[in-house]
Image: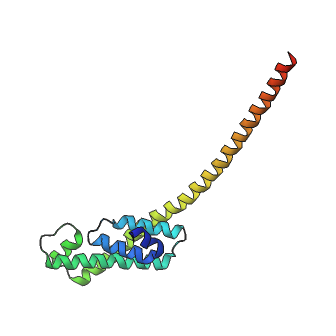
């Protein structure tokens, strides 16, 4: 089962898993997952409170996991969480700082996805309106063409 199928059938679990896997190095960027969460909220596929709870806990667990790896694997300095562990930052201080900063990251990225989802609905409505106008214009042009063709053929017959 692909990760998209997991999100489709189990959206909350899917978001959580994507955040955990992305946090430990798999190619699922945290920001993209948060934007996806906002999009799913805006399209009413998931509800805000459970979704935000799931992504918040997923981010924190992934970050704590990286912190703990950083406490035992000196030399892996790719991310701030690893550095915090390598530098022996107290766990409670790390969790508090990460919990506070994650709120802002979630707010921005989920907000972007939510706005994007709403914009998509607006664009869909505009496209539908444009399609209707386009069909109407085509019908009018066809009617004018048939009208002119009819009178042109009648005019040509009267001169014969």
Residue found at x 40% / y 70%:
106
Residue 66 position by quadrant:
bottom left
In this rendered view, identify the residue nearer to me: 1 or 126: 1
In this orientation, which residue lies closer to the viewer: 29 or 11?
A: 11
Q: Quadrant of the C terminus?
A: top right
Q: Name the residue: 77% across, 28% down.
A: 149
How many marks do you count on the picture? 0
The image quadrant that residue 74 belongs to is bottom left
Whether 38 is drawn above or below 58: the answer is: above
Residue drawn at point x = 45 percent, y = 69 percent: 37
Residue 70 falls left or right of residue 99: left
Q: Quadrant of the N terminus?
A: bottom left
**Residue at the (51%, 70%) spot, across then down:** 41
Q: Residue 54: give x, y in percent of width and height.
A: 41, 78
Query: Residue 48, position in %: x, y?
Result: 50, 75
Q: Where is 97 relative to 42, above or below?
A: below
Left or right: where does residue 119 sit relative to residue 74?
right
Q: Does the rendering let one see residue 108?
A: no
Q: Residue furthest left?
A: 74
Name the residue furthest top: 160
Q: Residue furthest front?
A: 160
Q: Horizontal and vertical percent for residue 65?
A: 25, 78
Q: Nearer the viewer, residue 148 or 122?
A: 148
Residue 95: tell me if it is visible.
Answer: yes
Q: Residue 137: name its quadrant.
A: top right
For residue 47, side relative to residue 56 (left or right): right
Q: In x, y percent, where is residue 155? A: 84, 21
């Amino acid at each position: 089962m692909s990760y998209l199928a997991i999100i489709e059938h189990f959206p909350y679990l899917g978001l959580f898993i994507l955040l955990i896997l992305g946090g430990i190095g798999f190619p699922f960027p945290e920001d993209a997952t948060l934007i996806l969460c906002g999009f799913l909220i805006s399209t009413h596929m998931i509800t805000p409170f459970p979704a935000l709870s799931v992504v918040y806990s997923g981010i924190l667990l992934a970050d704590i996991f990286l912190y703990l790896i950083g406490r035992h694997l000196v030399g892996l300095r790719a991310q701030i969480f690893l550095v915090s562990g390598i530098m022996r930052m107290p766990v409670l201080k790390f969790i508090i700082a990460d919990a506070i900063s994650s709120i802002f990251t979630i707010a921005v990225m989920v907000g972007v996805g939510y706005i994007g989802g709403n914009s998509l609905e607006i664009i869909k409505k505009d496209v539908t309106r444009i399609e209707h106008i386009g069909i109407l214009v085509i019908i009018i042009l066809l009617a004018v063409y048939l009208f002119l063709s009819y009178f042109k053929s009648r005019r040509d017959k009267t001169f014969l």
